[in-house]
Image (cartoon, helix red, strand yellow):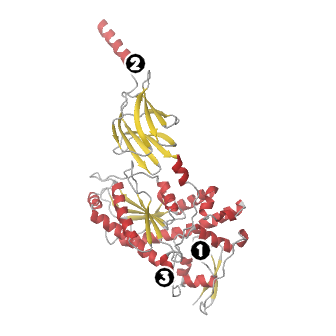
């Protein structure tokens, strides 16, 4: 009995001297992007950690209660991170992970709980401060024209997920990010083959961009439309087919309010003309009007583009939803850019996963989306584009030329023309009038959500006649504006 008591006391004493639990770093995964890098440490247990302030070129992450000072398997590299190593803290059950960085970075560390195929993760995000400042510098929203020939129509292609975020994972292990990048690569090639069109990518490699930043990238690239490519997933493995999503009115209104609250963005939203407006109240009024116009145009256009994409997709694959669906998705948050999210199929469906992996099906999907975009913009080119100018050269404009996303400076100019008191230094050049027929003239007061193209369809008259009769330099109209409408 004495021997047993001694053994129990000895065991208890040994246990009291041990850490609460022993943790380890199994793997380190490095995910670079153009101006940031994410470092993911796969842990055996939930870590106790702290990130110390940067000292020179060194950023230090302290992790308590590690059983060994090893990094495990290391995968990936980044120009922002020169080296990564570990150091045991003398006299403490603590390990320091030393990150040797290039330049000035801003670091953030946080824990992610187990999810899907991942276990406990300790994440360190490094942001290149110099690159971030350069990217956040004010930009003019006006597009440079190419002499008198007009500009290309710019289509931003967003490959969903990327980097450490694989998206949905199919039954056979196919990552959504692989499918979205493959379809996007084919889509950008097909669009760039068309004269008068230029496609750009929000991400060009296997790295992660937060969904809220993707519309901002499209804006800096002066995109006329943003197309985000995704693959759907559901618990019901029988669910299949493609669908297209557009921005919900609730999300658009919320984002519009946020943009207005950020007064430092007004110059960008107004295309640089905010310098003319010295009074802050007038500047806010102008920004409000510009964004109202942009939101009306972009939401109407986004819905029309979504319908066109669905019709083309229906020729090459089954449709899960035959009408555009609205949602409050982060990638669709821009009220000033027409945006759609294309779900090319259900990766969670066994048969559809296999099709989504094949190059032939990826090409068919990309071709369908490209056909829809090209056909739509050929029918409704932005007023200052090559296609619009080519349509009207040498003959009267009799077709609908919807400015899918007129640059903010063009919209702002139309606002100042309608409200000359807000900008006495600028005036509208008179537009030569032509005969608009001898029919009766009625008036229409513009309401929220209406656009010139919508009114043209409503009254059954060409947009060109509305522009001529009301002496409009472009297709932008104001809420409360009274328009003359010719009747047959």
State the image coordinates of residue 406 (x, y, percent, origin top left): 55, 70
Q: Which residue is mark 2?
A: 17
Q: Is residue 1 visible?
A: no
Between 308 and 74, the one nearer to me in the picture: 74
Element type at marker 1?
loop
* Mark 3 and mark 1: Cα distance apart in space: 19 Å
Residue 234 lies in what quarter of the image? bottom left
Q: Kindly identify which numbered label has been placed on residue 476.
A: 1
Label 1: how many Cα within 10 Å (few below 14, some 14–19, many 20+): many
Q: Quadrant of the N terminus?
A: top left
Of label 1 and label 2, which has the lower sequence position? Answer: 2
Q: Is residue 454 above or below residue 75?
A: below
Seen from the viewer's position, the closer of residues 300 and 320 is: 300
Q: Is residue 65 left or right of residue 429?
A: left
The residue carrying pointer 2 sits among few (fewer than 14), some (14 to 19) or many (20 or more) residues within 10 Å by Cα, namely: few
Mark earlier in primary sequence (3, 2): 2
Against 78, residue 313 (above or below) is below
| Mark in the foreground, 1 or 2 | 1
What SS does tag 2 mark?
A: loop
**Quadrant including the C terminus:** bottom right
- Residue 13 seen in the current view: yes
Left or right: residue 325 versus residue 440 is left
Give the side of residue 329 with respect to residue 409, left or right. Answer: left
* Residue under numbered circle 3: 391
Kindly state the secondary structure of the residue where label 3 is placed.
helix
Instruction: Report the Cα–Cα distance between label 1 and label 2.
Output: 75 Å
Q: Quadrant of residue 227?
A: bottom left
Residue extending furthest bottom? 438
């Amino acid at each position: 009995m004495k021997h047993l008591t001694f053994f129990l006391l000895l065991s208890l004493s040994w246990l009291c001297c041990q850490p609460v639990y022993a943790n380890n770093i199994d793997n380190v995964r490095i995910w670079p992007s153009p101006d940031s890098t994410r470092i993911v440490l796969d842990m055996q247990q939930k870590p106790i950690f702290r990130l110390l302030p940067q000292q020179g070129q060194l950023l230090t992450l302290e992790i308590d209660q590690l059983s060994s000072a090893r990094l495990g398997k290391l995968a990936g590299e980044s120009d922002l991170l020169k080296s990564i190593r570990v150091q045991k803290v003398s006299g403490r059950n603590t390990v320091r992970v030393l990150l040797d960085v290039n330049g000035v970075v801003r670091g953030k560390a946080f824990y992610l709980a187990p999810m899907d195929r991942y276990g406990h993760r300790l994440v360190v995000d490094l942001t290149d401060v110099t690159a971030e400042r350069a990217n956040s510098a004010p930009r003019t929203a006006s597009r440079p024209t190419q002499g008198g020939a007009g500009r290309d129509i710019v289509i931003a292609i967003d490959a969903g997920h990327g980097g450490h975020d694989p998206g949905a994972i199919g039954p056979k292990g196919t990552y959504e990010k692989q499918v979205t990048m493959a379809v996007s690569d084919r889509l950008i090639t097909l669009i760039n083959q068309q004269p008068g069109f230029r496609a750009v990518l929000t991400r060009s490699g296997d790295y992660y961009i937060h969904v809220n930043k993707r519309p901002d990238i499209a804006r800096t690239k002066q995109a006329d439309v943003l197309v985000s490519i995704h693959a759907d997933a559901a618990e019901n493995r029988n669910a299949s087919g493609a669908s297209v999503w557009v921005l919900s009115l609730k999300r658009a209104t919320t984002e519009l309010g946020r943009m207005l609250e950020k007064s430092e963005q007004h110059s960008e939203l107004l295309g640089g003309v905010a310098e003319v407006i010295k009074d802050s109240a007038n500047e806010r009024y102008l920004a409000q009007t510009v964004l109202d116009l942009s939101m009306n145009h972009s939401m109407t256009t986004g819905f029309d583009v979504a319908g066109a994409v669905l019709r083309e997709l229906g020729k090459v694959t089954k449709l899960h939803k035959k009408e555009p669906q609205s949602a409050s998705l982060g990638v669709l948050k821009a009220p000033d850019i027409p945006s759609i999210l294309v779900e090319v199929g259900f990766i969670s469906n066994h048969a559809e996963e296999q099709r989504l992996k094949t190059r032939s099906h990826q090409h068919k999907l990309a071709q369908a989306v490209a056909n829809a975009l090209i056909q739509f913009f050929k029918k409704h080119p932005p007023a200052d584009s090559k296609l619009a100018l080519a349509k009207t050269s040498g003959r009267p404009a009799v077709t609908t030329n919807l400015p899918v996303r007129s640059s903010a400076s063009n919209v702002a100019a139309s606002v100042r023309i309608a409200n000359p008191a807000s900008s006495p230094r600028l005036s509208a050049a008179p537009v030569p009038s032509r005969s608009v027929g001898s029919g009766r003239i009625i008036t229409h007061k513009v309401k929220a959500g209406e656009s010139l193209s919508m009114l043209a369809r409503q009254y059954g008259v060409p947009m060109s006649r509305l522009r001529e009769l009301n002496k409009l330099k472009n297709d932008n109209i104001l809420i409360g504006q009274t328009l003359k409408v010719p009747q047959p």
